[in-house]
Image (tube, coloured by chain):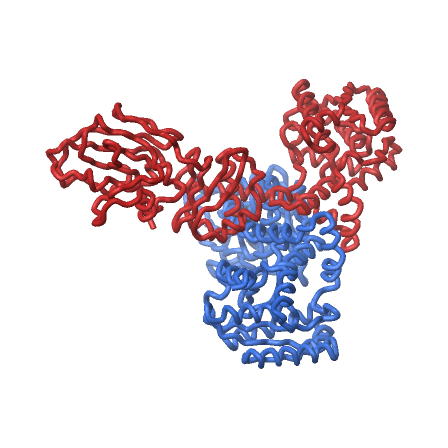
Chain colours: A red, B blue
Amino acid sequence: MEPLIKKVREYIIQNKLLDDTQRVVVGLSGGPDSVFLLHSLMLLKEEFKLQIYILHINHQLRGEESERDEKFCIELAQRWGLPIRVFRIKVEPYAKARKIGTEEASRNLRYCIYRLEAKRLGAKVALGHTADDRVETFLFHLIRGTGVSGLRSIPHSRDFIVRPLLRIFRREIWDYLKKHKIDFVRDSSNLSLFYTRNQIRRTLIPNLEQFNPHIREHIYHLTEIFEGIEEIVEKEIDKLWAEKCLLENPKIIVLKGDINKLSYLLFGGLVRRVIISFGFPEKGFNFGLVSRLKGATKGIYKLANHKDKKILAEKQKDIWLFFSHTFSPIPYEMELSTDSLELPDKLGQIEVKICQIPLEELKHSDETIGYIRGNKDKLKIRFPREGDRFIPFGASGGEIKLFRAMLEKGVPKLLRHYIPLVLVDNTIAWAGGLGISQLFRVNNANEKIIKIRWTGDIAEFMRRKELWRK
Amino acid sequence: MEPLIKKVREYIIQNKLLDDTQRVVVGLSGGPDSVFLLHSLMLLKEEFKLQIYILHINHQLRGEESERDEKFCIELAQRWGLPIRVFRIKVEPYAKARKIGTEEASRNLRYCIYRLEAKRLGAKVALGHTADDRVETFLFHLIRGTGVSGLRSIPHSRDFIVRPLLRIFRREIWDYLKKHKIDFVRDSSNLSLFYTRNQIRRTLIPNLEQFNPHIREHIYHLTEIFEGIEEIVEKEIDKLWAEKCLLENPKIIVLKGDINKLSYLLFGGLVRRVIISFGFPEKGFNFGLVSRLKGATKGIYKLANHKDKKILAEKQKDIWLFFSHTFSPIPYEMELSTDSLELPDKLGQIEVKICQIPLEELKHSDETIGYIRGNKDKLKIRFPREGDRFIPFGASGGEIKLFRAMLEKGVPKLLRHYIPLVLVDNTIAWAGGLGISQLFRVNNANEKIIKIRWTGDIAEFMRRKELWRK
């Protein structure tokens, strides 16, 4: 077996590219890479017990040349006795409709066809990407700005796509095709590449090669090293998340504040996970953001915008509070006629109960439970509004603004509009995180006592007052 | 405070650059970076309670210009009222004696002086490396070929060196100096840079900037991300080493053979650790080597060469055996007059004991213990030589070559010269890993029986025959 075919074979085995399939659809453009791909898979057909199908996509973007390529592929398939399917696609209308570039549009359409064919045949789709493509993609990501995941570059397999030539350089393919007198077509425009990619190939790589003729190999090796890093880093972030995440609610995530001491990599990984957890697109995540948050000490920061939603972050001494919402108060007011009420937006549940307990057992210090004097029928529940006033339990002064009382207690600013209040005759008798109002203090255990209990994960967080109290 | 000074201040605080010191020696060349470094540390002097010293090294490589720079630095020190020390060094003789380039020589001498001054004053040495230096070093490593650690580029601190300007770009420094009319000298030759580095600065970076004007910032961010990766990867390798390392001897390391399934990053990390464990320089470690070993199936591979030593690696089904030695047999022969003998090169210990035990309890299957007939006074110990012959216990055939017997049992090839033999009257009676010779079989429990016991970590490895037996 020729060394180059052996190299393809080893790459397939090492990366288990064809382990769970016998059917392979070869994406054939007619260019040297895909012709060599087809050729090598034909030589390995028996060993891997393959059934080979050919797929040619005619983008109809290069006039005569497109027709020539299609014809070449059909003839090649006939010569090898292989089934071929040709798809003729029109890229422009799709690109216009989606308002994307020609390149992105053809890529989308191509992968759409690959997916359909893979499904129809229960097959893998083999593509002719080479080590050079990998190196060029690495540089492309480097230039555009990327995290670690971009440097890993093109993967050897993903979903139904496999790339058996990913460790082989174009130079090797050309030499092989020339030596074995194997025909292929030449693409005059290299339309299959972005403009930037073309420039990387034509100017940047030759420039780098002046420094070191082996630069391609070096970069290729780096991409192989990066393949392992992502996995390790993700495992580390999993571990950190389990350790640092104090509350994970669809709207609120609380992390321990000491994460700022972590490296950029790990701190950034946690921030990225916050964004993903809230279902925001990763696009919002970038190094500038990470850098800003990592240096943050106290206050409110904007993390991401998506459609009409945003993520805000609040840093306090011991916590980072992330909040996913349109930042507006909840217009919610409800009479508490039942014994228990579900709050909106997963903010928990309020239960009320008439009870009688010894005076000395009444605790007013808990952030989620309160005992007040009053009549159960007149209770109302709502969330804080501007103008609300409150007399903190045990306070020597009189009435103060509710938001001021929250500020003094250290209730995170982002939570202040989402803390449930219990009102008696339109006066605030109890507020989550603050406790009961001095006005509703129980003085006599023989009085009618109402026990208020707030449950749910946010209530649980409020109970752990060492986390959020200044 | 000017934003740029604030940026220096934050970088110092975030990275704890001056936490355990009050004395700082500023390496002052007179160029814009080191002048700005001195300037900013003077502005932060009170806050950090600093005592500032100046150090100027005159390499005497640029004639008049070198003298001008020295004079400039002395005057600057006088103007600020700071103590200054000037070292005049001659680089060429040192470079010639060590057979290294001028650049490497001046670097070595410089760091030597930094170390002395740091020690003398109990101080940190602050150097004016900028974010651009970091970006250029990243590209330098990328071009030369590097693993992950090279991409981290220049660290903000190491030992007694700190680099407070590492997050600031040269552009920012120039703007600041111009705005504040602060004088500095210009280096006409940029001798402080390697030729390659100069080229990176003058041609490669401008080329990359044509693709993306923000490329410097992007690469700088990447280096910050890479700072965290090394630590995580090392932790993962620690874990893997504990799990996969079956034997760690100054000369022999055995790892589980399934490590070849790991990613390049982790597999390479383990190989690198083998090289370091044997005290070899890391230089021997490169991606080509890792790639070759990762694809290996069976046989012997050369891992590293250092002076007259080398590391060889042997792959068997379930193990990787790494062997650090000049690969030559041990010329060792000793009469066993005592009851116990220490073998050379940490190969273990041999104990012999006359005993009497029931015949049925004699076990010949253990690789480290044997019972033979014979006279204790006539025992000799040595290691295998070409030409040795042996009759395996229970073998139907007659005498065969000792190395053939080892081959058949699957004793790793690299170990075969290092397995102790016990001889009676110059005939091999017992061999580690093989057991006793048929000639010395105990037939009668009433006979005089000699118990041979081989201990030590290699003996322990040989006991676990499932690891090395085919």
Instruction: Tell me, yes or no, if residue A1 can be seen here.
Output: no
Q: What residue lies at 81% left-to-right and 19% top-to-bottom?
A: A81
- Seen as rendered, the residue at the extreme right is A181
The one of B458 and A23 positioned closer to us in this rendering: A23
Task: Determine whether, in the image, residue B198 is placed left or right of residue B437.
Answer: right
Whether B108 is drawn above or below B167: the answer is below
Residue in front for this viewpoint, A60 or B222: A60
Residue for point 66% across, 37% down: A155
From this viewpoint, is residue A43 visible? Answer: yes
B241 displayed left or right of A369 = right
Q: In which quarter of the image is residue A62?
A: top right
**Nearest the eye: B267 or A387:** A387
Q: In this view, does B93 lie to the left or right of B423?
A: right
Front position in the image: B156 or B390 = B156
The image quarter in which residue B319 lies? top right
**How far across and down, in percent of the image, does residue B307 sit?**
68, 63
Residue B424 against residue A254 in the figure, above or below: below
Q: Position of residue B310 (x, y in %)?
A: 66, 57
The number of numbered discs placed on residues in the rendered structure image is: 0
* Image quarter (top left, top right, bottom left or bottom right) of the C terminus of chain B: top right
Q: From this view, report whether residue A29 is shown above or below residue B400.
A: above
Q: Residue at x 75, y 22 (%)?
A: A53
Q: Residue at x 52, y 60 (%)?
A: B11
x%, y% of residue A39?
A: 80, 29
Image position, residue A250 (x, y; %): 44, 33
- The quarter of the displayed image where residue A98 is located: top right
